[in-house]
Amino acid sequence: MFESLGPDDFDEHRVLEFHRCSGRPAAVLVETSFIECVLHRAEPQHARAAAFWDHLDLADTSIVYSGFAEFEIFESAHRKGPQAARHHKSAWRDLLSSTQMHWASVDAVADDVPDLMEEFGLTAAGAVHVATAEHWEVDGFVTVDPSFGVVDRARLPLMIDAEGAQLARRLRVS
């Protein structure tokens, strides 16, 4: 049904916009900002993120998420208040039960985090996600956060919404 995603599907900055992805990535890492957009209908990028999530699921892509992302999701839920937190956690559980996802331990990548923080100026959370993507050798790092464009294109193929892609490309040029 879907042809395999190849290196030519990405542009020269190694960025691929959600709506331009027609192939099947074998494996991707979904970063917290993307998961949050899928979970929240009020997010501006929700429709595009949810459509891309469906594409990954239908293409039978291995969807990997960091154990740290789960903590970030719960933290975000608690900031929204008790009722919103319950809804948020329920939406996360529904997503986990409806999609084949792979949980990735932080332990395997912990030693790489300080170097990534120093090399690219990433937060600890950002470095955990990048290290996890590298460890799992995924075909794409799925996010709506263009700041991941600071990571060398050879190390991190970005799959991102159209608006975020513009900034990510600029970061990869500089």
Image (cartoon, rainbow, N blue to C red):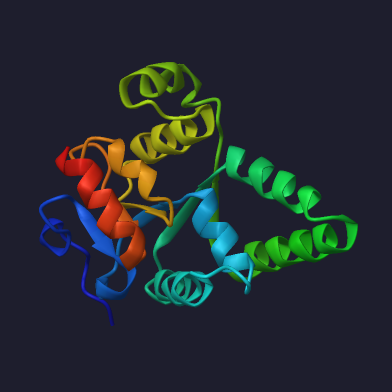
Residue 9 x %, y %: 16, 64
Residue at horizontal 37%, vertical 18%?
A: 118
Residue 91 x %, y %: 71, 67
23 horizontally vs 45: left or right: left
Rendered position, 9 above or below 149: below
132 horizontally vs 66: left or right: left
- Quadrant of the image containing the C terminus: top left
107 horizontally vs 62: left or right: right
Residue 6 x %, y %: 16, 60
Residue at horizontal 52%, vertical 70%?
A: 44
Residue 23 x %, y %: 25, 71
Snapshot quadrant of residue 152: top left
Rendered position, 97 above or below 174: below
Residue at horizontal 41%, vertical 22%?
A: 117
Residue at horizontal 69%, vertical 61%?
A: 92
Looking at the image, can residue 26 be seen? no
**Front one among 162 and 10:** 162
Looking at the image, can residue 127 be seen? yes
Residue occupying the far bottom of the picture: 1
**Front one among 139 and 102:** 139
- Quadrant of the image containing the N terminus: bottom left
Snapshot quadrant of residue 119: top left
